[in-house]
Image: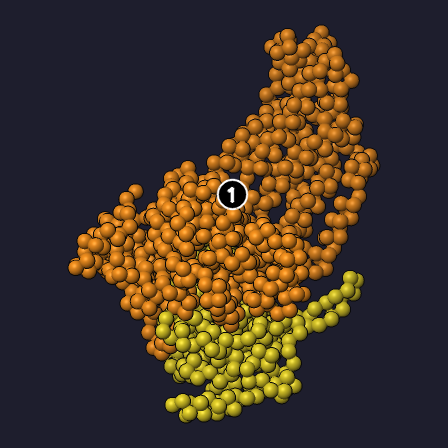
Chain colours: A yellow, B orange
Amino acid sequence: MNTAATTRPKPRDQDAGNGHDLLEVNDLKKHFPIQSGFFSSREVGRVRAVDGISFSIKAGKTLALVGESGCGKSTVGRLLVKLLEPTEGSIVLNGVDLAQASPEQMQAMRRQMQMVFQDPYSSLNPRMKVGQNISEALTVHRLASGKAAIARVEELMRLVGLDPKLANRLPQELSGGQRQRVGIARALAVEPDFIICDEAISALDVSVQAQVINLLVKLQRDLDLAYLFIAHDLAVVRHIADDVAVMYLGRIVELANSAELFAKPLHPYTRGLIAALPVPDPDLARTRKDAVIRGELPSPLSPPSGCHFHPRCPYATPICADYVPRAEVATQGRQVACHHWLDIQKADADTERTTG
Amino acid sequence: MTEQATMPPSATASLLSRVRRTWSRRGMPRVITGATVLIVMSILCFFSAWLTPHPPNAVDLSARLQPPVFAGGTFNHILGTDELGRDILSRVMVGGRTSMAIGALAVVVSLTIGSTLGLLAGYFGRRLDAVVTMLSEIQLALPSMLIIFFFLAVIGPNIVTIAIVLALADWVLYARMVRARTLVEKTREYVDAARVLGVSTSRLLLRHLWPNVFPTIMVLAMVSLGGVILSESALSFLGLGVQRPWPSWGRMVADGQSRLQAAWWIAVSPAFCIAMVVFSANLLGDGLPPDLEGRVMSHIKQTISATAQSVPLLDIRGLRTEFRSDHGTVRVLNDVSLSVSSGEVLGLVGESGSGKSVTALSLLGLVPRPGRVTQGQVLLNGRDLMTMDERALSDLRGREVGLVLQDAMTAMNPVLTIGQQICETLRRHLGLGRAQARRRAIDLLDRVGIPDPGRRVDDYPHQFSGGMRQRAMIAMALSCEPKLLIADEPTTALDVTIQAQVLDLLSSLKEEMGMSLIMITHDLGIIAGLADRVAVMYAGNIVETGPVRQVFKAPAHPYTQGLLASIPSITDTTKSDLQAITGLPPDLAALPQGCAFAPRCPQRQRRCETDRPHLIHHDAQSAAACWLVDPPSDRAANSTSQTTEPMRNR
């Protein structure tokens, strides 16, 4: 009871700051078969929602997974927590491959990994009180019961900046920001090392977003949490992430340290994505109108051949339609999957020299 | 962060509690009436062994066929007697016991079987679902009355067999409804959350899903209780019910029908009881709130879709909009004054509940009930829209003012093609012929950048992607070349690359057509890139307005300052904490007495808590509603005349 009632400060004595790989994802695939036929279910195609992605997250660090809707980023999150079964690949968390884990192993692993959901209005059970929503995890994993559970819920609520008195309210009596805090408290109840935030702040009001971002950052510092931060808002990602993986139609097109990625995006898609971002500065906003990406996201049912991005890419050549670009290591810890990233770099340097 | 607890609940929460109160006003009397009648009748029937004035089967030939007391009978037999002199009141009470026991038992059995199968089928899907669905389809295809006759004839009718046979006819209703609800509920994130926590399947079904499905079933159970009692009566009437001499209501009606002319009371009394039970069960079922969240959402959706039509160079003066309910008045717009000049882009920013969308609805005369514009003028080209009748307003909407909404899917009619919807506006407002309208629709689609417009004009809204739909909606709003376009969060639902395309389109169309644009959004980035002037709204007030560069570079109001500081910047390389605004947006139903922002304001003074600041010009183009902002002293006299009408504290 005692261990459950105190928040575990997790001293990670071995390599504290520069942690080990907590999570390692290798060649992860999720294909959804498309079946047709009235009596037989014949497979007529597959949606390759996630098509062979690899990344790793160190303890206490944040990897952001960004991309437009339909790129497969949320599917990755759901695969990691086994809400979906992967088609192929491995998900190794703390040395255990979740893709092969038995139900009993998985149940134990759920204590190490939790998820915060997007919609604060549907992610809490509306018929359970706030306190019950949080204590459900304690009951399921037999971490605490009775008075100890109540005390632990109070402690968790304080931890996420909620008044413990709200424990007896129903979720619908709370605001969106408060509900999201409840969602975070619920995830923290099992004392995980790793939390997946699936668009966890995009449904919140602007002024409340900042509070929740600050909370997530503070919790990371205090509890040494690792985050997989799935989001489409690049400004938030820039603020919160150590590393960023950019996804396009089921593949990672660029993976880099956050500062480097935003300072100098290598992949044409990343460049377009950053250029499309509205900047809250009237002077800056009006100078960067050029690099709008043409066209729309193609159907994941019949993605373009070769590099999925080639029909929208300003730098595309015939080779892009024929061959899938491999992930190339650009610099230490930085990958880019583009046939032309070096040429684009050179062209950039040339324009800089001529203009500057 | 602990300030949160002391803050009033958010606007949504208060909307919910308001809906709950409305429900209690409309639903409560029905529930109380229905429940009271049912409870009283159940008590009378189930305790009939002690309550009956006469033994129900006591034959008294000396008192045959006595009429009820109100038809000239005696108080000894209040409801009269039958042809054997048995007391009708006593028999009705005992008969009710049988009828209601059968009803309750049948409902419990069918509810249990049906909802268990429905829950499992809905949750597990696949083969189990196929089997349950097929069973229920077979059951529905068979004539249930015939099957009931068959079974009762074979196994012989008694209370339990009748109840079970009737239950077997009804389980399908529960199974289908529970399955449908489960399919909906299981897609909600709390179910995923429970699975991620490692909640076992049985616990997930019983503790998470079932409580969310159950309320809908209660309604159905009440309604079918009435149905089962009717069926039982029908069976008894046909001689397949409970056997003599023990009465049931149906049996009594059957027995009484032969003497309907001479002794009507024998059949009418039990018939009346059947009617009462069925009626009050339905009343109870009706009054139960089927799904609170569902109602709130549909209310919100209605509010949104009500804006799906459009309307007005613009001068808004002292606009005040209130929503009235039994529990007081909520002022959602508090003396809002705005102006948009020709060719200008005004950015209206605020968080949800700040009143930015209501401003658009108010000026178009589209505020959903129970909302009402109670004060103010909206001058479009000098004509006051507030004094226009509905017909004149609707002529104006679409023609002079266009509206683009966030969700093009709900704003469009799904059963009409894009072309038909554009043509409808063109023909109504411009009086174009069919062929002319179609040509122009194609032209418009081409102009908003839809590829192959000649073919896509005949597509339905669902055949368009989100970005294309938004383009089509812009085409629709622009079809009559309005002088003013109001865009309410037009790109919030779109991906960033598509958002950039749509914003580019709006900006170039504005230049091309020389129209004015009101851009309503919560995204300060969009405003920075597009707007000439900004108005910042908070809790129904405009708290700051001015040229975009000035407001962004030197915000005067602490709220604007906080808002700008709280958004992470892509160019920011530091990893420090964001300067979040503490607390929550206020509940409009319980605004603080002074400045609405005061409880969250880092610079608040005593005055801020007691007096509400007015919008005061601090230079020629900018104004802020804050006590900290001083009007320039040399123009002090001048600026007081420029302030909007003083706001009265409520």
Between B631 and B205, the residue placed more toward the observer is B631
Quadrant of image for the N terminus of chain A: bottom left
Which percent across, then down, holds residue A245? 50, 78
Name the residue located 65 percent from the left edge and 36 percent from the top edge. B225
Name the residue located 30 percent from the left edge and 55 percent from the top edge. B597
Name the residue located 46 percent from the left edge and 70 percent from the top edge. A233
> Does residue A102 lie above or below B370 as drawn?
below
| SS type, badge 1 | helix
Name the residue located 60 percent from the left edge and 56 percent from the top edge. B422
Which percent across, then down, holds residue B81? 69, 13
> Does residue B367 lie above or below B2 as drawn?
above
Between B100 and B356, the residue placed more toward the observer is B356
Q: Is residue B213 visible?
A: yes
State left or right for residue B379 relative to residue A345: left
Q: Residue furthest left?
A: B634
Q: Which residue is mark 1?
A: B391
